[in-house]
Image (spheres, rainbow, N blue to C red):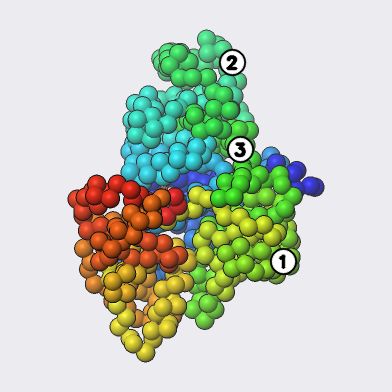
């Protein structure tokens, strides 16, 4: 099969949700359909339980789980589906943002009772910035929840999405009878007793809602309610057009219950029909299309080995074009050197296996002894820098101090490698060379301290530093930037790439700096 045929088989996506909405459960049901796992409970939840935020063993355990569940691939209806796992915990939001650069579409899971929650809002915002096609799955219909129309309103206002329902619930909670698929024109009855998928005899084809079969199956009053609601849907929401979904202009919505495996097959079947194949990727130099013959790919995630005796890491590479082959020399653009890989790994559910070839849309794991950093590109020789893998302005800061002077080398190496992995960001102050760690969440500080000790034998402690935000600065006018740098020397630092960063003590000082230096641009992501 040619690489073009292979790429047309692939659908690479991520499931995003606020913790507890049902992401793990839905993932598991999808894998069951694909035959990638045989029983429920095989996918471990990759979430850090609320009570365990300071339990390091829990963090280590979760790290192990998150390697196993980073990518889960399965085959369904002749397609290869790659699901990328996205941590739901807010302290790992940056990991999730980066993972979203490697997908071509997402499914957003929302709890019918809780509606749109904070973490979902943030993640969907990142997807919208990139016009990623989004399908919404409203989960837990077996429980009482919000009114379906109110939920659609909430999705539109809070997530900024334009929606069109492709399935519709008949009742909810105790009165939940099933869903009507507007996409397939089917009524699927909910069998509360069973945790398996709908049996064939539970699916009724109803092209005309006036059909008396509907009354027979759900009762007259529920049938009339459904008729009225579908009438409203057709008059209020736009008809579904695949091109609108693909451009990110419209998001189809499905209703169901993941734990009961209800509405999941309808979601998957529609996903397979409409979700995009591997999409082109933007680089600083040009757009790379998956159909190109030459191989290209970028690293979006790095995972350190759990065993401290083996310091190697796994770099996760998204293939963007061409065919990747084992034991072939590829060009590491940042390092300007050729490298080949003898054990590239593919992930089929929880199993890993060495592969000989991989195609656009695939995610492979490359064993790495410290050559890779997040955002690195591999090519067949062309100099390309993939865009869309920025660092975000951190919001929590601490000075880091070495508490074991005999282990300075280990500390520096450990810090460098943890920063390459994207655990946090390191800034070195311009005036006194002190190091500041910036993170999105507080949990990372504990993770860094623990891992420095256990993996590098180095010790550090932290000192509070009063900062509001770090932002990257640039200017078209070199003299203006020089003047800014001279005036604000004590508030400046360099990031690990040597880029100039302004450390603002408060929202007010940031505002003043912006007003006093109109020619200087302040950036809230490292990519500008
Ligand atoms: P997450 O990955 O998004 O964090 O959520 P997860 O799938 O772990 O689901 C969170 C909880 O919601 C789980 O219960 C799960 O069983 C439940 N759940 C998922 N889908 C449905 C559904 O359709 N209906 C109902 N009623 N519950 C659902 P738990 O008690 O936290 O865990 P467990 O002990 O059941 O595994």
Q: Which residue: 52% across, 36% down? A: 133
Query: In the orientation shown, which residue stands out farthest toward the bottom?
Result: 406
First in sequence, mark 3 or 1: give its number: 3
The image quadrant that residue 431 belongs to is bottom left
Q: Residue furthest front?
A: 479
The residue lying toward the viewer, choosing from 288 and 122, is 288
Which one is closest to the eye, mark 3 or mark 1? Answer: 1
Q: Residue at x 45, y 65 (%)?
A: 497
Question: x and y percent of residue 279 in the render?
Answer: 61, 42
Which tag is nearer the camera, tag 3 or tag 2?
3
Q: Residues within 10 Å of mark 2 (few under 14, many from 20)?
A: few
At a point 37% along the width and 61% down the height, the residue shown is 500
- Give the residue pinned by disc 3: 276
Q: Quote the CA–CA distance across marks 3 and 1.
A: 30 Å
The reply to whether callout 1 and callout 2 are in contact (CB within 8 Å) is: no
Residue 266 lies, with reference to residue 236, above or below; the image says: below
The CA distance from mark 1 to mark 2 is 56 Å
The first of marks 3 and 2 along the sequence is 2
Q: Secondary structure at mark 2?
A: loop
- Name the residue beneath numbered marker 2: 207
The percent coordinates of residue 523 (x first, y second) are 37, 51
**In contact (CB < 8 Å): disc 3 and disc 1:** no
Res. 361 in view = no
Taking the spot 45% from the left edge, 13% from the top edge, the residue there is 235
- Is 499 situated left or right of 489 in this image? right
Q: Which mark is residue 9?
A: none
Q: Position of residue 110 (x, y in %)?
A: 40, 38
The residue singled out by tag 1 in the image is: 329
Which dot, 1 or 2, sits closer to the camera?
A: 1
């Amino acid at each position: 099969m040619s690489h073009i045929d292979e790429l047309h088989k692939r659908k690479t996506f991520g499931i995003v949700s606020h913790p507890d909405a049902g992401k793990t459960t839905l993932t598991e049901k999808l894998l069951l359909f694909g035959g990638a796992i045989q029983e429920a409970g095989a996918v471990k939840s990759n979430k850090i339980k609320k009570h365990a935020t300071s339990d390091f063993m829990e963090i280590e355990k979760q790290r192990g789980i998150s390697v196993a569940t980073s990518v889960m691939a399965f085959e369904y209806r002749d397609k290869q589906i790659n699901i990328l796992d996205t941590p739901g915990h807010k302290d790992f939001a940056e990991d999730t943002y980066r993972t979203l650069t490697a997908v071509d579409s997402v499914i957003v899971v929302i709890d019918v009772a809780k509606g749109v929650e904070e973490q979902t809002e943030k993640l969907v915002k990142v997807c919208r910035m990139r016009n990623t096609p989004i399908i919404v799955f409203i989960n837990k219909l077996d429980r009482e929840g919000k009114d379906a129309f109110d939920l659609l309103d909430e999705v539109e206002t809070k997530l900024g999405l334009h929606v069109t329902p492709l399935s519709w619930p008949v009742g909810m909670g105790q009165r939940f009878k099933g869903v009507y698929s507007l996409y397939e024109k089917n009524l699927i009855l909910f069998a509360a007793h069973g945790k398996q998928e709908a049996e064939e005899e539970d699916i009724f084809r109803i092209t005309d809602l006036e059909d008396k079969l509907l009354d027979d199956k759900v009762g007259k009053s529920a049938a009339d309610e459904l008729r009225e609601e579908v009438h409203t849907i057709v008059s209020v929401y736009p008809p579904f057009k695949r091109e609108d979904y693909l451009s990110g202009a419209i998001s189809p919505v499905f209703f169901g219950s993941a734990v009961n495996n209800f509405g999941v097959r309808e979601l998957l079947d529609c996903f397979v029909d409409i979700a995009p194949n591997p999409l082109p990727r933007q680089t600083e130099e040009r757009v790379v299309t998956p159909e190109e013959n030459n191989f290209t790919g970028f690293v979006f995630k790095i995972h350190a080995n759990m065993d401290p005796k083996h310091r190697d890491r796994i770099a996760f590479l998204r293939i963007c074009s061409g065919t990747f082959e084992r034991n072939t020399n590829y060009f590491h653009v940042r390092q300007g050197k050729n490298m080949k890989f003898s054990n590239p790994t593919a992930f089929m559910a929880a199993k890993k296996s060495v592969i000989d070839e991989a195609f656009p849309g695939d995610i492979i794991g490359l064993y790495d002894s410290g050559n890779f950093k997040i955002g690195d590109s591999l090519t067949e020789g062309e100099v390309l820098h993939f865009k869309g893998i920025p660092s975000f302005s951190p919001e929590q800061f601490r000075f880091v101090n070495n508490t074991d002077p005999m282990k300075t080398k280990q500390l520096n190496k450990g810090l460098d490698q943890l920063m390459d992995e994207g655990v946090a960001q390191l800034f070195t102050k311009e005036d006194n060379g002190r190091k500041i760690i910036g993170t999105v969440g507080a949990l990372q500080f504990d993770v860094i301290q623990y891992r420095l000790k256990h993996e590098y034998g180095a010790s550090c402690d932290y000192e509070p530093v009063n900062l509001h935000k770090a932002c990257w600065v640039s200017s078209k006018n070199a003299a203006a930037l020089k003047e800014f740098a001279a005036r604000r020397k004590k508030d400046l630092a360099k990031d690990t790439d040597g880029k100039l960063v302004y450390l603002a003590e408060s929202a007010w000082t940031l505002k003043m700096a912006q007003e006093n230096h109109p020619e200087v641009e302040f950036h809230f992501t490292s990519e500008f």
